Amino acid sequence: MKFAVIGGDRRSALLCSLLQRDGHRVYSYALEKAELPADIPKAGCLQGCVYGADWILLPVPAERAGQLNAPYAAEPLALSELISALWPGQVICGGRLGQENCLQAVRAGLQVVDLMQRRDFAVGNAAVTAEGAAELLMKSSERCLWGSRVLVTGWGRIAKILALRLYALGALVTVAARKDGDRAMARAFGLDTCDFPELREFADEFDFIANTVPARVLDSGLLSLLRPDTVLLELASAPGGFDISQARELGLPVLSAPGLPGVYAPYTAAELMRETIYAVINEAEE
């Protein structure tokens, strides 16, 4: 099988090696600045890379503001341009593909696989993200997580795993969530809970805050109530849970961690991508 790996970070570079090691033909594009094995071609043109490829593998997330997410590329590439270069029947696979680009791909006769829509991948990705987040928090302060007051906002996959990891490390974890059912589940795991409006009553008690909600749940008023040494970790996609610039103006320590799996554990993240791709292929053959 021929795979064309286009764009991405260290995860994509390692994915090239893993797929080649499994006996597949692998070509790359928009990875010009990445370290790849010498026998994995860095195609000089997009058409040459994707010609005859069964699968077109994009990063997670696949795009940023309509452009291919490609930090190792020599020059930017619009995702719409990439889709236009493909042939009907090819499979385009990535994470968080935008609706407009998905529609363009379907109209072009392509098969679209969004990794983040698959539970097996999303759960694994959340686990890697949560582990990386815990390490970031441990390195960010002179405080130990054990005995510290930590706020986790949201109750999605990442929030659930992160809150339980921090609790296992001895942190005093509070989960802020809007839904009664989510707060009830968090309490069942032994965690403290609150709704977002309640945070103002004890905002100055937290040593660490990890946001997983892609909406402004921590407004300027609440940020101003935090202690100056409260560490803020942003894990959500844009617009994020709080204004990072405003938090820094208030003197708060801020950690922004987009694409954390690719930074913290790129090899594990690449293995997860490979396993999910193989699962999709096997399901199609059954």
Image (cartoon, rainbow, N blue to C red):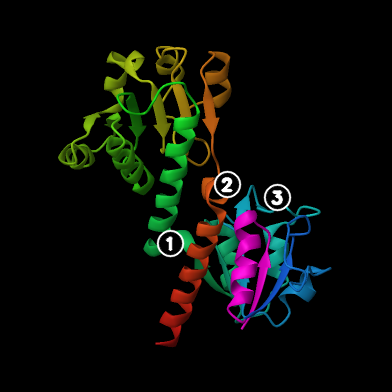
Residue 206, position in %: x, y? Answer: 35, 20
Magenta part of the chain: 1-23
Q: Which mark is residue 71?
A: 3
* Foreground residue among 174 and 164: 164
Q: Which residue is mark 1?
A: 121
Q: Residue tagged by mark 2?
A: 263
The residues bearing labels 1 and 3 have C-alpha atoms spaced at a distance of: 22 Å
Q: Is residue 213 above or below residue 70?
A: above
Residue 230 is drawn in which quadrant? top left
Which secondary structure lies at badge 2? helix
**Residue nearer the viewer, 119 or 87:** 119
Q: Position of residue 72 (x, y in %)?
A: 73, 53
Residue at 41% in and 14% down: 226
211 to 9, vertically: above or below: above
Q: Tell whether position 112 is magenta.
A: no
Of the 4 image quadrants, the one containing the N terminus is bottom right
Q: Position of residue 184 (x, y in %)?
A: 17, 39
Crowdedness of circle 3 by 10 Å Cα count: few (<14), some, many (20+)? some
Please tell me which residue is depicted at 31% across the width and 38% down the height of the picture: 163
